[in-house]
Amino acid sequence: MIQYENISRNYGRKEAVKRLDLTVRPGELLAFLGPNGAGKTTTIKMTVGLLRPGTGTVRVCGIDVSSHPREAAGRLGYVPDQPYLYEKLTGREFLQFIVDMRGMDRSLAQERISQQIEAFSLDEFIDDLTERYSHGMKQRVVFASALLHSPDVLIVDEPMVGLDPKSMRMVKDLLRDQAAQGTTVLMSTHTLDVVEEIADRIGILDRGELLFLGTLKELKQRLPAEDASLERLYLDMTG
Amino acid sequence: MASAIEKSLAAPDAVTEAQVFWRLRRRLIGAALRSLLATSRLRAVLITLLTTFFWFGLYTLFFEGFTFLHQETQISPDLLARTIRSVFSVFFMSLTMMLTLSTGIILYGGLYRADETALLLTLPARTERVFLYKFQAAVAMSSWGFLLLASPMLVAYGVFVDAPWYYFALVGPFIVGFAFIPCSIGAIFCLLIARFLPLTRQYVVALFVLLMIGSVVWGGWSLASISQDGILSTAWLREMLARLRYSQHRMLPNWWLSAGLLEAARTHSRGPEDHPAADSIKFLCVIVANSLLLHQIAVWTAAKIFRDSYSGLMTEVSRRRRFITWPETLVFALVFFYPRQIRLLLVKDLRLFRRDPVQWSQFLIFFGLLGLYFLNIPSLRSGANQPYNGTMMISNLNLAVVGLILSTFTTRFIFPMISLEGRRFWVLGLLPVTRTRILWGKFLFAASGSTLASCSLVAASDLMLRVDLPVLVVHQVACVVLCVGLSGIAVGLGATLPNMREQSPAKIAAGFGGTLNLIVSAAFIAIVVLTTAIPTYRYASALDRAHILLEDHPEKWLFWLIASAVANVALGTAAVLLPMWAGLRAMRRMEF
């Protein structure tokens, strides 16, 4: 579960996130939508402990991320918009580093690594140095690393950028599966059809404010229009 | 499965966590070394050879320096010991300041500007462990130069005084223990500035650099103002020691280091209660204790404020800058004789250069240091009774130094220019401008900028050394040839051996093409300088003989001066045309 308790964050004088109050429940997939600069990535970075809220508290599984970032990180899996991998490590060595960092038992860790390699079809390149990987390959390895410890909370920033249709399908199925298994999934994206297809709830952010929070059905009810596609509704709402 | 993972998941304890990070570092270093040996053997061999050459060169220089002090000055053993102690103290004091600054800057880049930090901060790692991991890398990166400079001096001193074995055994622990003191101070400052003065950090660093430069200038001025009569005499040395007393304050780590090492090297006993080895180890303990304390303070500081400072810097709003454009407008007007498209390319490259602090700051540092050195040239020039060929040797060495520094600059910044166009080559490729023009535009940009800076420095050096007009002209021709030739080599080879996949100019320069560029440039400099130096030296020697014997006619050497200038022009033309021809062929075949 993720709880945002009246959080704000400024960039200089500009308020990037304004008094956000929100709870994402276990087993729920919440998608943040919003134009560039809306505050989606800032919110995500506060959730994973990279940024501190100016005011308010972010809790992951009841743990205050600001005061206990290490404990919170133990419950989280995070896939950033720009995946970082060590160029001079192979994908397998990178996954091994992640399981070591998470203190996983050796035999279980090997089992989980093998499962993730299979789940994300990494076997063809997992023993190559990651400097040779394409963006999509990197993204798949980072996804695998985020799921190695079966996190309670999965946070994904712009997951579809640079992925081919097959990989996109894989990611959509995976996010849905994770939510079905009880994981709290928070996703930020610009890809409206993905949101339409897999999100349980949608949060529309603009200029740091949460303009809407609810299901697609509730959104359609709120803004009745003849062409009630998500794109039309989103554009109407964000201007 | 989930419950099994839950059971097995226990955040690693501090020792296990440290082992995980060390394993990561070992893997990264191992992979980097394997990659270096597999893809850049030439570079690896060159680095090893040059480092060995540099180390033994320094060792010889220091050993000869100590021997000279001992044999030529005929000062008392006590004064000699005090002089060496003072030299050590000043040397290590300068390195303390440089290590503090360089560790602070490198650590800032590693902690706040590296993508790796974001990954590590989202893993269940202790904040102080992330800091330590980056701090160790910063210490290694900032201290290798210190090791390379200090070790030959200390080994040379040990051999010179025939020091006991434990002196050589203690040199390593002393250097490593000492290096952690300024490095930890630099790290603490880095964290505090990033946390509490994030918006003014550049000004704080600039102020520190200014203070360093100010203290160096003040120190140099203080020494230069000692009367030059009776240089290296007992009175002169005593005066110098008095003025360097500030570096030997008992609370300064550089004094602990020099005193500890000199105690270890001492072979004579001052009495039955005197134990030089024990005294030396006492100083080593003081250094290690202070290192550990400062290291621990740095770790505590990081644990307290690193995450806050990281968050603060990541949400810092970059100030909207108003860029000045008049330098490009001026250059555009000044090079009116070039085709318009080349002028536009020149302006674009100049603008990129001006807005990249890494490029212009290194250019300024290289040529600024040369400028400072050249300002001291008047003290090297010939007096009425000193031979002119000695002055000529210095003048030719200055030409060589300018060439060598320029070659590092062209390798680091000019060679990667075509590679850096790689990902945006379609912009140039789709414009109505021929690739020939693009390449010549790069060449003109490199050649014009370097000629302006280098020829001014060489002219200043020659004027201060008071060389006569024919030599000054020959040196200017050689300097233009060096600038134009090195630019041609860098641009031509850069287009012939591009690395379009790499975005970092440092990595492009460090690859095979960059290394080859450095070697070809060094060979070219050697040929041009020798072609210039031999006739000018012979000309100066002839002038010396004419002055003494009143019979040799130096005029006949004027012919050889002219011949050397003509030969250099031919060399320079070849150095431009051959690589540019190869580069143009490669460019025409390039796809985007």
Image (spheres, grey):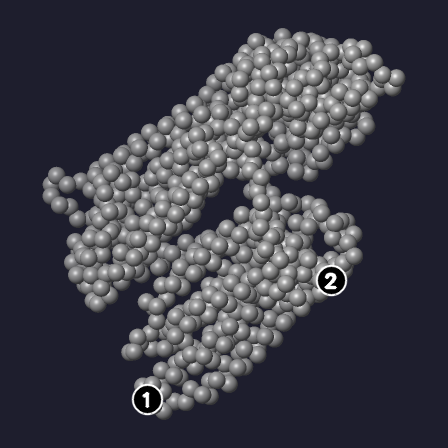
Q: In the rendered image, which residue does mark 2 sit on?
A: B436
Residue B97 showing in the rendered view: yes
Q: Where in the figure is residue A116, as x and y percent of width and height?
A: 70, 21
Q: How many marks?
A: 2
Badge 1 crowding class, 10 Å Cα cut-off, few under 14, some 14 to 19, many 20 or more, is few
Q: Earlier in the sequence, mark 2 or mark 1?
A: 2
Q: Indicate left or right for A117 with A88 as reference.
A: right
Using the rendered view, name the quadrant where residue B177 is placed.
top left
Amino acid bearing label 1: Leu
Q: Residue at x 61, y 21 (%)?
A: A17
**Residue drawn at 78 percent across, 12 percent down:** A222
Disc 2 from disc 1: Cα separation: 57 Å
The x and y percentages for residue B306 are 47, 27
- Name the image quarter holding the C terminus of chain A: top right
Name the residue that disc number 1 marks. Answer: B549
At 82% from the left and 22% from the top, the residue drawn is A232
